[in-house]
Image (spheres, rainbow, N blue to C red):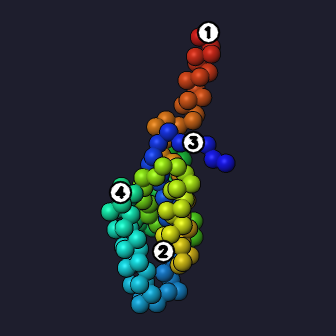
Amino acid sequence: MSTPSTTSEYLLLIRNTTWHKNVSPKDIQKLLKRFTTWAERLSNEGKIKRGYPLAPEGKIIARSKAVTDAALAETKEAIAGYLVIQADSLEEAAEIAKDAPCLDYGQTLEVRAIIAEPSELQFARQQIANEQR
């Protein structure tokens, strides 16, 4: 059972930037057509709000404020792109994600609710309120 969300926007993180390495150009073209058709249908239904592919390279910034190259291009966990979708629940968002054609080619999708305030900030506010009593 999932916790109800206070939002109707969900982030679909598309993982695996190397899915195409062992796929023929013809199959890549088929997938792109299927993906475009799927995304256009969802857009027409008002389900997709926006989305973009991401470059495989990136930078990682840690607490030390050191900036290092993120060698993400070879990993299946690298984020290839994202979509922001509209859904009534996490379950509905997951059902939408299950139809994504990219799943047939080794990519995975992570579905996360977009929330107004992080739980850590909610916790801190509650602790401060308790101390003031």
- Marks 3 and 4 sit apart, C-alpha to C-alpha, by 21 Å
Q: Which residue is mark 2?
A: 101
Q: Which image quadrant for residue 45? A: bottom left
* Circle 3/circle 1 CB separation < 8 Å: no
Q: Residues within 10 Å of mark 4 (few under 14, many from 20)?
A: few
- Badge 1 amino acid: Arg
| Discs 4/1, front | 4
| Discs 2/1, front | 2
Q: Which residue is mark 4?
A: 46
- Badge 3 amino acid: Pro
Q: Nearer the viewer, residue 42 or 127?
A: 42
Q: Residue at coordinates 52% horizontally, 56% vertically from top-left?
A: 92
Query: Is residue 35 depicted above or below 51 in this figure?
Result: below
Query: Which of the image's four quarters has the C terminus?
Result: top right
Q: Nearer the viewer, residue 113 or 126?
A: 113
Q: Residue at coordinates 37% horizontally, 74% vertically from top-left?
A: 37
| Discs 3/2, front | 3
Which circle's residue, 2 or 4, is located before the other in the chain?
Answer: 4
Regarding residue 111, the answer to whether it shows in the image is no
Q: Which residue is mark 1?
A: 133
- Marks 2 and 4 sit apart, C-alpha to C-alpha, by 19 Å
- Badge 2 amino acid: Pro
Q: Which residue is mark 3?
A: 4
